[in-house]
Amino acid sequence: MPVSVELVDPWATAHDAGAVFGLLDDIDLRFSTYKKESEISEINRGKRSLRNASDAMKKILDLSEETKRVTHGYFDIRHDGIIDPSGIVKGWAILEAARLLRGRYLLNFAVTIAGDSQVSGRNCTDEPWRIGIENPFNRKELIKVLVLGNGEGVATSGQYIRKGHIYNPKTGQTAADIMSITVIGSDIYEADRFATAAFAMGKGGLAFIERVSGCEAYMVGHDKQASWTSGFDRYVMAE
């Protein structure tokens, strides 16, 4: 997945960006289901037990169970005996990268992985960060531009780029009535995990996000019609 790190503070250095990429490499090596040598792959092959899992793995598993509970079972990383934490690791990893940068006394930055972003402070023109929402029917077009506040995050879930990776765990079927849902959260971890769960819910995901404190959402259906939560408009940049 493409990764970008934008550092605005004049005292930021290449070493700061390098530290972020080093952190993300370590997380990928631990949680990637595509790498045979990753910790999660060893757990899924039975080569390592959950009892002997790393603290980071146990943390992600605990967060996943908590998310499963608050989404009423629509977020579930266990499928046919396989654990795939991808739906929660990306947002968590971006947030960990942001924490690393703050620990290095950086105040103004954006960390983005595959279009999901965590922002801090202001952008290079000393304005609030702006994030575009792609049209799922034409990825060259932005259908909305969002203005994010300090510390907020935004994540989009959909299957117009990568098909078949999100499904309703209650039915085993992918959502057939929506193309994408974009969620703004108090941070990227919240936005990412709830975007995944809401997409699995289909059209009902928007009503779910409406009830989640601190989150707003914008949904595009297969019928090319958009709908959004009651507080979403305050994030949209005026045209």
Image (cartoon, rainbow, N blue to C red):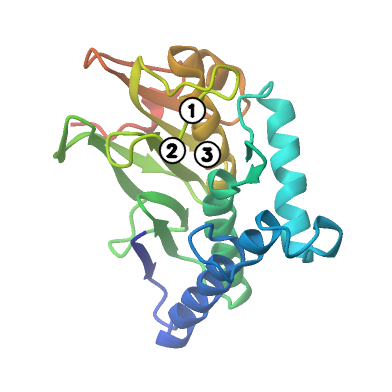
Relative image position of residue 23 (x, y in whole percent): 56, 74
Of tags 3 and 1, the one toward the viewer is 1
Crowding at dot 2, Cα within 10 Å, few <14 / some 14-19 / many 20+, comes out as few
Residue at point 53%, 60% (across, down): 32
Crowding at dot 3, Cα within 10 Å, few <14 / some 14-19 / many 20+, comes out as many
In screen coordinates, is 95 left or right of 163?
A: right
Give the image quarter of residue 13: bottom left
The amino acid sitting under disc 3 is Ala
Relative image position of residue 87 (x, y in whole percent): 54, 43
The amino acid sitting under disc 1 is Tyr
Residue at point 65%, 25% (across, down): 71
- Distance between the Cα atoms at labels 2 and 1? 7 Å
The amino acid sitting under disc 2 is His
Q: Which mark is residue 149?
A: none
- Distance between the Cα atoms at labels 3 and 1? 18 Å
Tag 3 near tag 2, CB within 8 Å: no
Tag 3 near tag 1, CB within 8 Å: no
- Distance between the Cα atoms at labels 3 and 2? 18 Å
The residue tagged with tag 2: helix, strand or loop? loop
The residue tagged with tag 1: helix, strand or loop? loop
Q: Which mark is residue 167?
A: 1
Give the image quarter of residue 137: top left
- Residue carrying label 3: 191
- Residue carrying label 2: 165
The residue tagged with tag 3: helix, strand or loop? helix
